[in-house]
Image (cartoon, grey):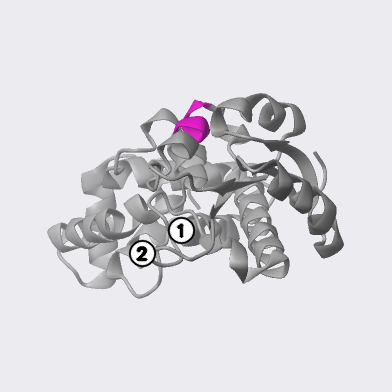
Amino acid sequence: MDGSAGVVVIDENAWFRELMRETLPEYGVTVLGAERSPGSAREVIVETGAPVLLCTVSLGDERCEGLFGLLSALPERDVPAAVVLGDTFRPGGHILPGGCPRLGKNDGVAAIAAAIRNAAGERRELLRALNGEIGPERAVDIMLNSLGLSEALAGVDYLRRAAPMYAHGSTAAKEIYITLGRESGALPKSVERDIRFAVHDRVPKASVYVRRMLFGSDWERTPTNMALIARLGRAVGAAGFDSSPE
């Protein structure tokens, strides 16, 4: 799959699946497959490398357990982003548990297509960061943003500065906290606390595909400070960061 806006549609209604096949291409989205349920979609996702799923919430499955089960079962790098539809409304806000954007069918095809394109673009950028195709500073920014970690939290700046330290070989938490504290005029325990708050406040709300790509089978667990720092540090190394101290 070399296009960036391909989608697999999951909906019980055959008429709606056909409507998406016919209309989404007019908005720059290629329909790679259309299935009745998450359980029947796995094969086509793997075969096509679809970057996005468009999945309608079924009655009785408002928390999208079927969708999340599908995403959990796919290989990490094959996990697509997911856009979730309500039948006629936008239930409970624009983000579902699992960090999936959602909207109602009555928002229209243009809005659905825009959500698919946005999801595909964000996923593509994350893959580029993980594959070392982007400079190290930009790669860290992309990963932090994908996890919902913004500049508004003090711990985010510490995470950004900790990533190259890890890539340089500083793999002990105490060493990293002391160095960051010394540079910032803060106590090491304050550094640890600020990072921990940022991680616990934001990471559980990030998209399923982001957490799967970053943390693999442990995606449902909130990572420790050092688990996240290590993941960022490995991406810094993949981006060509010089791992020998100056």
For the residues labelled 1 and 2, the Cα–Cα distance comes to 8 Å
Residues at marks 1 and 2 touching, judged by CB atoms closer than 8 Å: yes
| 160 is higher (above) or lower (below) than 237 | below
The numbered mark, 1 or 2, whose residue comes first in the sequence reads 1
Number of numbered tags placed on the structure image: 2
* Location of residue 36 in the rendering, given as x and y in whole percent from the top left corner: 63, 35
* The disc label shown at residue 13, or none: none
- Is 123 part of what is drawn in magenta? no
Q: Secondary structure at mark 1?
A: helix
Residue at 37% in and 58% down: 159
The front one of 177 and 98 is 98
| Residue 171 visible to an observer of this rendering | yes
10 left or right of 110 in image: left
* Left or right: 77 as drawn, with respect to 110: left
Amino acid type of disc 2?
A: Val
Dot label at residue 144: 1
| Front-lying residue, 78 or 130 | 78
Task: Characterize the local packing of mark 2: few (<14), some (14-19) or many (20 or more) Cα atoms within 10 angstroms.
Answer: many
Residue drawn at (55%, 63%) of the image = 104
